């Protein structure tokens, strides 16, 4: 260990003698014992587009008083809008950051995680009118863990925001990209940026928006995969009245149990890709119900980007 420390000091001292910072960073990056990270950029160099049609996506991140969208208030919102065409991201067009004073003091745990204090939010109110205008321009909303942010937006915002949110397609940069298949051990935002060579001060809303944009830019194919996932249709299917002795078969196929106390009836349920529906119905008829045509009468709910990640998609209308 003494020899390693002595060697490290010699190496660092040599780096300090180099004539420029870029050369020093390049030298460090080439050394097997050191790693150079770059701060996530909060700027974007505009690209040109040869396409006739471009679209707007908005990345939204929230900081809240807790994890329950039915009761915990939003205390910060970040929004970052960008223009894209069929080929790539073109430019960042808008950014917004707002704080909101909640009705009760911010819990110490939330301050520890986010760094947001009561003093930071005192007298502050989010301009939801400005947010509405930005969302109205957007064809797609992207969140990193959309199941969290979407439900807070649908339950803890003014009614006019809830209405426009329910009409927007959502994509999730955490779940709509198969990060594991791309070689990552986790889909956490900080980890993905770290593996891509970046760091940032996390858990502030607008900074997290830039960090989300960064992984979609830096990981080849990530944004394309997200858009493809957004276009997919799924089906929530409820296997009601299945015999008790079929439960292990259903569990092994990915079905989960609903006790009937929530939005779903008492049943085994699963969310399927649309193209798997015919195959799944045949399996249910043959293996679970032992009767042809039974699966066609089961309750179901279509899931698209307009209700995906919303609690509205977790029930039967």
Image: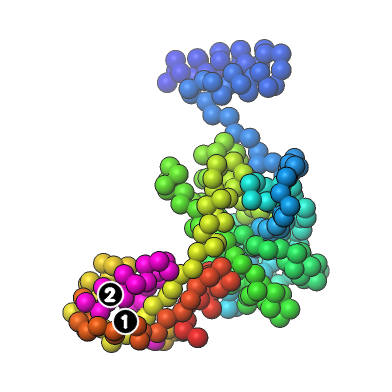
Write down the residue under mark 1.
295
Would residue 126 be found to the left or right of residue 196 on screen? right
97 up-or-down from 291: above or below: above
Q: Residue at x 50, y 64 (%)?
A: 232
Quadrant of the frame with the N terminus: top left
54 up-or-down from 279: above or below: above
Residue 51 image offset from top left, x and y in percent:
71, 49
Mark 1 near mark 2, Cβ–Cβ under 8 Å?
A: yes
Magenta residue span: 265-286
Query: Along the polypeptide, which appears first: circle 1 or circle 2?
Result: 2
Q: In the rendered image, is residue 189 in sight?
A: no
Residue 202 image offset from top left, x and y in percent:
62, 50
Total of numbered circles in the picture?
Answer: 2
Q: Residues within 10 Å of mark 2 (few under 14, many from 20)?
A: some
Q: Residue at x 31, y 76 (%)?
A: 281
Q: CA distance from mark 1 to mark 2?
A: 8 Å
Residue 214 image offset from top left, x and y in percent:
63, 45
**Front residue of this view, candidates 281 and 12:** 281
């Amino acid at each position: 260990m003494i020899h390693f420390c002595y060697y490290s000091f010699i190496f660092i001292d040599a780096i300090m003698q180099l004539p420029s910072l870029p050369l020093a960073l390049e030298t460090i990056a080439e050394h097997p014992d050191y790693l150079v990270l770059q701060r996530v950029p909060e700027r974007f160099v505009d690209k040109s587009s040869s396409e006739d049609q471009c679209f707007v996506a908005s990345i939204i991140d929230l900081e809240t008083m807790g994890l329950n969208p039915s009761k915990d208030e939003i205390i910060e919102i970040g929004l970052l809008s960008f223009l894209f065409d069929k080929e790539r991201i073109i430019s960042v067009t808008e950014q917004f950051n707002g704080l909101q004073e909640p009705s009760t003091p911010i819990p110490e745990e939330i301050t520890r995680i986010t760094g947001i204090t009561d003093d930071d939010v005192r007298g502050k109110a989010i301009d939801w009118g400005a947010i509405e205008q930005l969302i109205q321009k957007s064809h797609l909303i992207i969140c990193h863990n959309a199941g969290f942010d979407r439900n807070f937006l649908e339950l803890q915002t003014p009614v006019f925001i809830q209405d426009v949110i329910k009409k927007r397609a959502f994509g999730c940069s955490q779940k709509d990209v198969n990060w594991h298949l791309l070689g990552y051990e986790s889909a956490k935002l900080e980890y993905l940026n770290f593996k891509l060579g970046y760091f940032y001060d996390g858990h502030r809303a607008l900074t997290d928006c830039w960090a989300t944009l960064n992984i979609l830019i830096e990981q080849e194919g990530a944004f394309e995969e997200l858009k493809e996932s957004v276009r997919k249709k799924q089906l929530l299917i409820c296997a009601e009245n299945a015999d008790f002795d079929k439960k292990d078969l259903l569990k092994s196929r990915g079905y989960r149990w609903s006790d009937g106390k929530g939005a779903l009836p008492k049943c085994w349920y699963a969310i399927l890709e649309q193209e798997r529906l015919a195959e799944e119905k045949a399996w249910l008829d043959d293996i679970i119900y032992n009767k042809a045509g039974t699966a066609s009468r089961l309750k179901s709910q279509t899931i698209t980007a307009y209700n995906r990640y919303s609690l509205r998609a977790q029930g039967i209308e």
